[in-house]
Amino acid sequence: MTARPPGFVNRESRVAGIWLWLTLTAVAGCFLPGAFGLDPANAGFPVILLLALVAFVGGLCVLVYWRRAVLLDRLVTGDVVVHWTYAEDEWQRYVEADFQAEARQRRRMFFVAAGVCLAIGLGFLVWAGDGGVMVFGFMVGAILLLAATAFVAPRARRRRLRRGPREVYLAPTGVYVATCFHPWNTMGGRLDGIAPLAGPPVMIQLMYSYPSKNGRQSHTVRVPVPAGLDGAAEKIAGVLGRRS
């Protein structure tokens, strides 16, 4: 494998390192009750159990982010289709356009899911008597949670894009936008669609999915095309379509 590009920082490996530190700290903490003379059958046991749970979850996170770090290294040092950097003004235009598109998509998903939840809740309220009130309340809570997610997620994404480096690595195996890594060549993932988006700003929209317990879970990422390369969107879409 060739060396990483100059100045490139693999943030996935940083996250893996943080989780590794937390995991090792939790493992070491499992021995603290004995060191302080706590009775494992009383105060010591809950502490050990909690730390063991933290260590287990942390170990899983280390594996996940270590794998993502390896995939990101392979992406930026392998068969990169394009590596683009951007001026400050065009990057900010992209961030706002991506935010508006993501917010619209989240709103559509929210209204569909909220409609289903409301219909189920009303059905139980009408036909299930007292038990239906509890189900209806649960569905209202689910709708509020969905609304919060639809509101917060696009803004969190916008904040991350603003703070990240103004660059994109695009390859047949995934894309790295600022600090957001989207691989589709692992765990049953696949690239489902590529579409140029007319500007301004001109973008390439990539749709990929992963298997989940409820079927395939879809994701969308938009890549800005630098000024003066408008015709590159169709060409790159064709290249990725052939190689994916």
Image: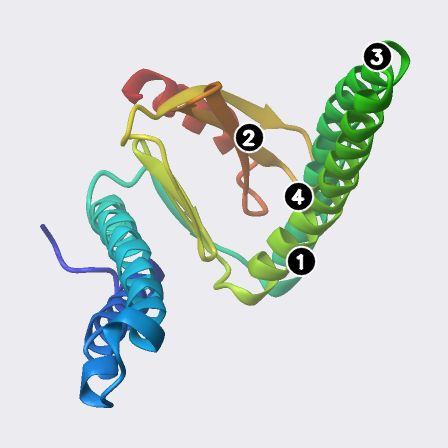
> Residue 98 got which mark?
4
Identify the image quadrant of residue 116. top right
Disc 1 marks which residue?
92
Mark 4: amino acid? Asp
Please tell me whether residue 144 is drawn above or below residue 89 in the rendered image. Answer: above
User: Residue 67: image x %, image y %?
Assistant: 23, 47
Determine contact: label 4, label 2, CB under 8 Å.
no
Q: Of circles 1 and 3, which is in front?
A: 3
Between the residue at mark 4 and the residue at mark 2, the CA separation in whole angstroms equals: 10 Å
User: Residue 233: image x %, image y %?
Assistant: 51, 30
How packed mark 2 is, by other alpha carbons closer than 10 Å (few <14, some 14-19, many 20 or more), is some
Disc 3 marks which residue?
123
> Residue 205 got which mark?
2
Identify the image quadrant of residue 132. top right
Question: Is label 2 in a helix, a strand or a loop?
Answer: strand
Mark 1: amino acid? Gln
Residue located 11% across and 54% down the image: 2
Query: In the orientation shown, which residue stands out farthest toward the left?
Result: 1
Q: Earlier in the sequence, mark 4 or mark 1?
A: 1
Between the residue at mark 2 and the residue at mark 1, the CA separation in whole angstroms equals: 17 Å
Mark 2: amino acid? Gln
Q: Of circles 4 and 3, which is in front?
A: 3
**Label total for image:** 4
How packed mark 4 is, by other alpha carbons closer than 10 Å (few <14, some 14-19, many 20 or more), is many
